[in-house]
Amino acid sequence: MKNPAVVVLVLLALGVALFLATQRKEASDAKFRSTDEFIQFMATEAVKDAGGKERIDLDYGVNSIKEVEEILGRLHEQYAKDPSSISAKGLGSAYGAYIGEVIRRSDATAQWEQDDHVGGEKSYPIIWGPGAGHSYPMAWCYQRIVNGPEDNVWVKYQVLKQGNMKNLSRKTK
């Protein structure tokens, strides 16, 4: 006779796997009417992930990008141990959408696009700042998960924000 605890654990694992597969199917079957609707969905997924697994409440404030950097650091550690243990592309896209939403909400000039002449089809750049710079926060987050601290998203945000401020001060002189 099998150990009842093992049977319960196996059934629990199967239930969790079925639930996650259903959630992914619902997300992949979703039809979005606009780029903004897709981005909102993805950013909300990041907020849910951070609140559930990480117990971090992301509030769309600029300083929350630091919290996302910490989460991505932990995801990198997990990825470095076993790349198949997480979806770097999916999590990178969700957290990138979140960071882009932080930028959009804090900068009246910011807007999302789906495609870009540099990033290509479905690269989802956010265009912001006085020079209308194109940034790719989904790619930032994917690279942070895969490459590690050298792709720190907080540093990227700070550098770009400072560059935008310098461009703004040059244009107003």
Image: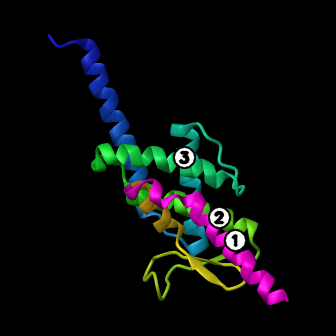
Residue at position x 46%, y 43% in the image: 74
Query: Which residue is found at the position 49% from the left and 65% from the top?
Result: 140
Q: Which residues are magenta?
A: 146-173
Of residue 152 and residue 110, the one placed in the foreground of this image is: 152
Of 97 and 173, the residue lying toward us: 173
Comparing marks 3 and 2, which lies closer to the viewer?
Answer: 2
Picture disc at residue 70: 3
Say which residue label 2 marks.
Answer: 158
| x and y percentages locating residue 89 in the rendered image | 39, 60
Q: CA distance from mark 3 to mark 1?
A: 22 Å
Q: Residue at x 43, y 82 (%)?
A: 121
What kind of secondary structure does the magenta stretch mostly adopt? helix
Quadrant placement of the C terminus: bottom right
CB within 8 Å, label 3 to label 2: no
How many numbered discs, if any? 3
- Based on the picture, tell me whether residue 171 belongs to the magenta stretch: yes
Residue under numbered circle 1? 162
The image shows residue 130, relative to residue 5, as above or below, that is below
Which numbered marker is on residue 97?
Answer: none
User: Which kind of residue does numbered mark 1 sit on?
Assistant: Gln
- Residue 159 at x, y percent in the picture: 62, 68
Q: CA distance from mark 1 to mark 2?
A: 6 Å
- Callout 1–callout 2 Cβ contact below 8 Å: yes
Report the residue that reaches farthest toward the right: 173
- Kind of residue indicated by mark 3: Glu
- Residue 109 appearing in the image: no
- When the figure is inspected, residue 60 is found, relative to residue 31, above or below; the finding is above
Residue 138 lies, in percent from the top left, at 49, 66
Q: Secondary structure at mark 3?
A: helix
